[in-house]
Amino acid sequence: MSSKRIGTRTPSPSEIDEPIVRIKKRINDLGVTSKARRSFEQGQISDTDELVRLSKAELNERWGDRHWNLYSETTRILEGLGYDISDRSRW
């Protein structure tokens, strides 16, 4: 009788070293809430490259106290598209 090992597969080194490719998308092509979509349209943000460049101060200036919900939603979206959002967590 042979024994089988049950567990998770360890990724090969080439899979680990593959760079994460960021995917630029137009705001209209994102699955965002209607409130976020209106905010981006009013702020004239057309794609995710523009969105990732917004600083905390710019978000606060454009959307005031509402910017935290918008920040949270966009951070999740950007992360899912492969953008480096590590500096956003220090806000």
Image (cartoon, grey):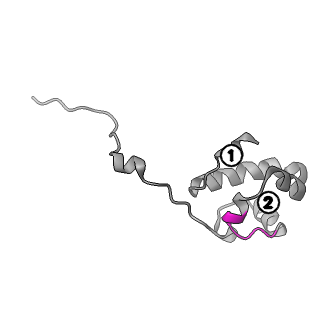
Is residue 77 found left or right of 51 in the rendered image?
Answer: left
Decide: is 45 above or below 86: below
Q: Quadrant of the C terminus?
A: top right
Q: Nearer the viewer, residue 15 or 25?
A: 15
Magenta run includes residue 49: yes
Q: Nearer the viewer, residue 83 or 81?
A: 83
Q: Amino acid at mark 2?
A: Lys
Q: Say whether disc 1 or disc 2 marks the residue closer to the N-terminus.
A: 2
Q: Position of residue 84 (x, y in %)?
A: 61, 52
Q: Residue at x 72, y 65 (%)?
A: 50
- Spatial CA distance of label 1 from label 2 is 25 Å
Q: Which span is picked out in magenta?
A: 44-50
Q: Are marks 1 and 2 in contact (CB under 8 Å)?
A: no
Please state which of the two labelled residues, at mark 1 or mark 2, is closer to the viewer: 1
Decide: is 54 above or below 45: above
Which label sits on residue 87? 1
Decide: is 30 above or below 14: below
Is residue 16 found left or right of 73 in the rendered image?
Answer: left
Q: Amino acid at mark 1?
A: Asp
Q: Position of residue 29 (x, y in %)?
A: 64, 69
Q: Residue at x 68, y 46 (%)?
A: 87
Decide: is 27 above or below 67: below
Q: Position of residue 74 (x, y in %)?
A: 70, 54
Q: Quadrant of the N terminus?
A: top left
Callout 1 secondary element: helix
Magenta run includes residue 75: no
Q: Position of residue 68 (x, y in %)?
A: 80, 47
Q: Residue furthest left?
A: 1
Callout 2 secondary element: helix
Q: Residues within 10 Å of mark 2 (few under 14, many from 20)?
A: few
The residue wearing badge 2 is 35
